[in-house]
Image: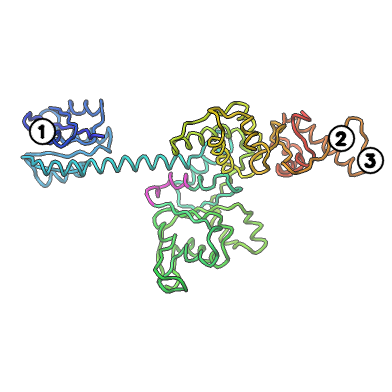
Amino acid sequence: MTARILVIDDEAAIREAMRMILEYDGYECVLAASGPEGLASIERETPDLVFLDIRMPGMDGLDVLDRIRAFDDAIPVVIVSGHATVSTAVEATKRGAFDFIEKPLESERVLVTVRNAVDRRRLADENRQLRRAEQLRHEMVGQSPSLARITDAIRRAAPTNATVLVLGESGVGKELVARAIHRNSQRSRERFVQVNCAAIPEELIESELFGHEKGSFTGAAEKQIGKFEQADKGTIFLDEVGDMSAKTQAKVLRVLQEGEVERLGSSRTLKVDVRVIAATNKDLEAEIAKGNFREDLYYRLSVIPIHVPPLRERREDIALLVKHFVDLFARENNFRPKRFTVAAFEVLQQQPWKGNIRELKNTVERMLIMSPGETIDVADLRSLRVEARGDAGVPAGVGASGSAVPAGVPAARPPAVGERPGTLREFKEAAERAFIVEKLREQQWNISKTAELIDTPRSNLYKKIEQYGISQEVDG
């Protein structure tokens, strides 16, 4: 695409000379005889580069520069002057000018400046697009009250340097929370370094986190900079922190307490300024009780704890998430988006989603790739076994409450009307089933409200629903 270059100069001869130089080299050239005329041209169609005379009647070139920067600070502006002084060049640079060239203009100097400025603008545009794509990939989507609470916690935690511990099941989006905290912090222009503590072998994790010197152990052929050093001035995200060994935990605690790291094989201590965000799907308090996790490290990490609920507790977000994943997949793969029917959305909302948002995303991508039509309906879900898998769905006949009997698990037979239990166990089970069904009906099959009403954990209620084969279609 041809670069569009705007020349703002009150001298007609200069404007024509610039037009000849630029058009001969294949650029599109637009001319303006004054500052206001040039600003109006910028508002109509943003140029890729502006050459701006510094001395013009009416509006001074530096004032025009300020107005251009206020309108779009990504437009490179080259100041042109016939009366150049060092102080003028310095002032123009302070105000954001890309370059400063003197009259009379030499064609080679002009063209070199154009190439440099256009390349810089193109790189800036590409970086902006990449950052936008990265933000979309890690965007937190939903309107549920639980997500609103998380967003509020992020807003409060982000501007501080406090350590944050993100808690939740696998696949709920703990990394998204960590990235949102970094993105909204004062460290956002610095690095976000992610470490999956569960994915690194125990014998390598210390080297990965803290680095090592050449020859410090067998196989250490080169010096390695550790993740904490890489994250200096930025943020380090320790994912699955509950899987760290006791030795590594002690070293991480030292970083938090002293702000110091020491590479393996080195006696030199290095100062680092790092904001630590940790995440785990484990119950760290239970791990402390077992002796698997340091209590002092736990309190250092959990200055601000943020709990991310599983997807089954924020079902109202599923439709928005599906649409988001459809748009994201289509954009990243140059793929024509497909539409999910209302019935398909309802089925997806009824699933247990044991893999949470990660599982939902994978399911949506599978449906987009494998379904033959432009619209995805319940039949497509069934044909691709979305409804029959214990890990990606539930069988047909699921209730709106999300209750289901996973494939392969024999459901308890509901007692027939008038049938008398033959044993004490059968009587207890029949009574418990009837009680749960009654309470689910009272709460319009809302699992969370029912669990709260009967004073039992949601996880236990789900187990009972599966055990007794309860569903709204059968028992509603």
Picture quadrant of residue 446: top right
Q: Amino acid at mark 1?
A: Met
Q: On the rendered structure, is 88 left or right of 348?
A: left
Name above or below for residue 290 compared with residue 395. below
Question: Which residue position is annotated with label 3?
Answer: 422
Q: Which contiguous range is marked in magenta?
A: 179-190
- Disc marking residue 20: 1
Which of pointers 2 and 1 lies earlier in the amino acid sequence? 1
Q: Secondary structure at mark 2?
A: loop
In this rendering, would 40 be left or right of 390?
Answer: left
Give the distance between the C-alpha atoms of the residues marked 3 and 1, in whole angstroms: 101 Å
Along the polypeptide, which appears first: circle 3 or circle 1? 1
Check the picture and name the quadrant holding the N terminus.
Answer: top left
The number of numbered discs placed on residues in the rendered structure image is: 3
> Image height check: is 224 above or below 347?
below
Instruction: Name which residue type carries label 3.
Output: Gly
Relative to residue 120, is residue 220 drawn left or right? right
Measuring from the top left, give residue 321's x and y in whole percent. 54, 35
Q: Nearer the viewer, residue 425 or 327?
A: 327
Considering every residue shown, the one lying at the far front of the view is 372
